[in-house]
């Protein structure tokens, strides 16, 4: 009889109905919200930098509407850029890299109105994560990082932020999906949620039902309703640890430029499969070049992980320490091979020297001898900014001329007249597109 009762109990506990009952929302999210709100801060422009009430990215119509809203509430628009969540009582907070707009210092505002100066300890644009060091006279309330790998589609989450300047606002939703961004961006999956994430909420935490931070909110998807994204907390943890320890994220590196293999490329290279990464360039002296890899080689797997997209490659490199020997399956010379090579460390951005070319509010620097030039800064209000160029963009063509290095860029830009329209082929997050730049001098 006992065995039958036990079997029935196990059957009930594991049934879909019981699982659905366990997933029901609590009677109130207030305990979780109260526990985490004190650790969430608004990130605002320093007073001397305020020029548009903090709504510069929303357009004139949105600014007018928000101005009326704040006036109706008896307040004035603040200078909110986004939100941040404190992870260490000593003043280490994490926020979104994009909301900082190139600033090296901001102010953060606690839910009780206390204001603190914060310096940008480091930022990682590829994952859209930045670390702040908050200067405070004593310990600050901090939140716990949870395990984002435990989150399932359908789990309840809270998004906490400062939408349109309303500090410590809370919205509830579920994990809608684990979305892979194949065109670049954060490593691996992003948490997709229908919890409201509006301008001003980016950089705030996505919190599970236990009050643990399981994601860092990004902006809501444009032109979509009920779709927001968050970098998973396990990625946040790694980025924060690296920035605190090294000032930047330390990534594994092969020293290659690659593109996904297509059916047409597979036929052209006589490959009997249609999944892999085709090497378009190999950095001289890099790990791949040292191992004898050349252009035209096709990477099939790294550490037994199949490679079909650039995100697949970044996923693997993200979890392997530089210097470690890795196994690489590849196709070259009409046959499949397996080799071992020592993974390198992705080079730090060049520092200590000025770019060779600064023009039209655009500063560029060399990436590799044959890759193009990278945009290192864009002056607000400049022709480059008006064209939509951003820090980190890769310029591959200048008026249909291929740009391989700074010398090519200097030569192409030397004879440009003011008011002349220039077409640039720009690669952002591995997605190429053309932009038009009109120089003012």
Image: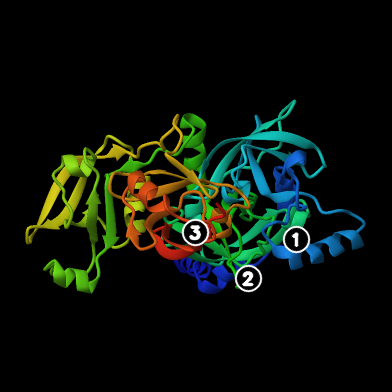
Residue 302, percent across and down?
Answer: 24, 51
At x 69% / y 50%, what residue is drawn? Answer: 81
For residue 349, side relative to residue 147 (left or right):
left
Residue topped by disc 2: 226
Which colour assignment does the render follow?
A: rainbow
Q: CA distance from mark 2 to mark 1?
A: 21 Å
Residue topped by disc 1: 28
Which numbered disc flags the more N-terminal residue, 3 or 2? 3
401 and 176: which is toward the camera: 401
Pointer 3 with pointer 2, Cβ within 8 A: no
SS for callout 1: loop
Q: Can residue 278 be spotted in the picture? A: yes
Crowd band around label 3 with a 10 angstrom C-alpha radius: few (<14), some (14–19), many (20+): many
For residue 137, side relative to residue 190 (left or right):
right
SS for callout 3: strand
At x 21% / y 56%, what residue is drawn? Answer: 299
At x 71% / y 37%, what residue is drawn? Answer: 141
Pointer 2 with pointer 1, Cβ within 8 A: no
For residue 233, side relative to residue 433 (left or right):
right
Pointer 3 with pointer 1, Cβ within 8 A: no
Residue 385, percent across and down?
Answer: 57, 55
Q: Quadrant of residue 142?
A: top right
Residue topped by disc 3: 190
């Amino acid at each position: 009889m006992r065995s039958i009762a036990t079997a029935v109990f196990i059957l009930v506990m594991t049934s879909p109905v019981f699982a659905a009952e366990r997933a029901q929302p609590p009677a109130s999210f207030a305990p979780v919200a109260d526990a985490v709100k004190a650790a969430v801060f608004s990130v605002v422009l320093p007073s001397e930098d305020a020029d548009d009430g903090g709504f510069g990215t929303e357009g004139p119509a949105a600014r007018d509407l928000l101005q009326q809203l704040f006036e109706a509430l008896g307040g004035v628009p603040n200078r909110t850029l986004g939100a941040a969540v404190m992870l260490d009582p000593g003043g280490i907070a994490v926020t979104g890299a994009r909301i900082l707009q190139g600033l090296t210092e901001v102010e953060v505002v606690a839910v009780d109105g206390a204001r603190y100066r914060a310096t940008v300890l480091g930022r990682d644009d590829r994952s859209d994560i930045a670390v702040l060091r908050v200067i405070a006279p004593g310990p600050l309330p901090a939140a716990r990082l949870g395990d984002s790998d435990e989150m399932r589609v359908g789990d309840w989450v809270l998004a906490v932020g400062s939408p349109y300047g309303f500090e410590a606002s809370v919205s509830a939703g579920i994990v809608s999906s684990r979305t892979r961004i194949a065109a670049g961006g954060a490593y691996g999956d992003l948490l997709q949620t229908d919890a409201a994430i509006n301008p001003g909420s980016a950089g705030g935490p996505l919190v599970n039902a236990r009050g643990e931070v399981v994601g860092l909110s990004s902006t809501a998807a444009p032109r979509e309703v009920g779709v927001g994204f968050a970098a998973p907390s396990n990625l946040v943890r790694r980025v924060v640890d690296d920035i605190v320890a090294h000032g930047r994220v330390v990534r594994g590196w092969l020293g290659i430029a690659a593109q996904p293999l297509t059916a047409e490329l597979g036929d052209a290279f006589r490959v009997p499969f249609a999944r892999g990464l085709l090497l378009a360039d190999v950095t001289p002296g890099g790990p791949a070049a040292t191992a004898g890899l050349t252009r035209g080689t096709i990477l099939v797997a790294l550490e037994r992980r199949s490679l079909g997209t650039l995100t697949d490659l970044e996923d693997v490199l993200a979890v392997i320490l530089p210097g470690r020997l890795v196994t690489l399956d590849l196709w070259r010379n009409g046959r499949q091979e397996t080799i071992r090579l020592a993974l390198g460390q992705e080079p730090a951005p060049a520092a200590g020297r000025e770019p060779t070319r600064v023009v039209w509010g655009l500063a560029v620097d060399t990436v590799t001898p044959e890759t193009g030039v990278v945009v290192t800064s864009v002056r607000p209000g400049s022709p480059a900014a008006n064209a939509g160029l951003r820090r980190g963009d890769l310029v591959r063509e200048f008026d249909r001329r291929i740009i391989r290095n700074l010398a090519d860029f200097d030569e192409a830009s030397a004879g440009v007249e003011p008011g002349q329209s220039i077409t640039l082929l720009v690669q952002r997050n591995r997605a190429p597109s053309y932009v038009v730049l009109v120089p003012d001098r």
